[in-house]
Image (cartoon, grey):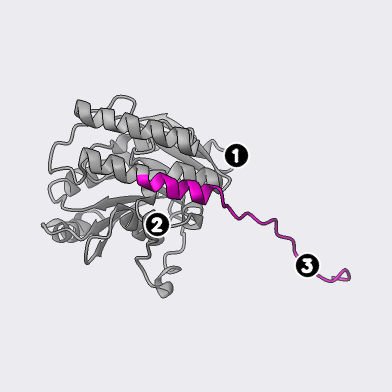
Amino acid sequence: MSTLINTVSDEQKDQALPSSLALSVVVPVMNEVENVEPLISEIAAALRGRETFEIIYVDDGSTDGTPARLVELTKAYPELRAFGHKVCCGQSSAILTGVRNAKARLIATLDGDGQNDPADIPALLIRIRASENIEQTMVAGWRAKRRDTFIRRLSSKVANSIRSSMLKDRTPDTGCGLKIFSREAFMRMPQFNHMHRFLPALMIRGGGQVFSVEVNHRVRERGASKYGVWNRLWVGIIDIRGVMWLIRRPVSPVVEHLKRPDI
């Protein structure tokens, strides 16, 4: 199983306390200089006038102009906050950094390559707000109509089938980067490398529920994918065994307040 991750010091963990913002949109990126401005513009267009929100970009050790471009864009987009890893730590670490620094109680994540459509975020928000227990609910995007090559679609179908049968997460598309969940629920999850692939299973492990909503999926127009078909598939299969171990060992104590009878 992949190693546990920790991207900030203990002193930093509680600095980003939830505020009056309704939503924090967390976007992990690496070497996506051509995609950052178009996607930020789309996120802002999808949410302005609807929600109070912030956009958190986490640059995961890019070697192109992504960090500098993000700094420039903070001037044009007041909702944008940018963070960076000095070296590449992986997508799960980048998401964790973003969530730890988020100010809203609800988190939306999406991939930074532009294939997730920010216009779908409002529909996912409606679904999670319809839940009786928002803190224990995750809404996951479902790319029912994938805009990828045949071999990529096939590998994703195989991986999702294996994950579903072994983890019982009842989620047709765990690999979709577009998800909405509570910051509190995420921070209670065990944090490890590649954990972003298993968020629905980890939500269920913590006593929560997961709903899938069909979303738009788009062709990548700029940049190159950071994942190969087969390395993504086999790494995921290897990690499943570790997640299965975690699922079998949840700790959910029933807590009571012990006090004197005369109080």
Find residue 46 and report its horizontal and vertical position in percent.
Answer: 31, 39
Marks 1 and 2: CB-CB under 8 Å? no
Query: In percent of the image, x 30 and y 33: which residue is there?
Result: 156
Residue at the spot 46% in from the left edge and 59% down from the top edge? 19
> Residue 192, which numbered label?
2
Residue range of the region highlighted in magenta in the rendering:
238-263
Residue farthest along the right direction in this orientation: 262
* Mark linked to residue 258: 3
Residue 16, x across and y down, in percent: 42, 64
Identified by mark 3, the residue type is Leu
**Which residue is at 31% across, 35% downward?**
119
Element carrying mark 3: loop
242 in the magenta segment: yes
Dominant secondary structure, magenta: loop
Q: Residues within 10 Å of mark 1 (few under 14, many from 20)?
A: few
For label 1, the residue is 132
**Which of the two discs, 3 and 2, labels the residue nearer the N terminus?**
2
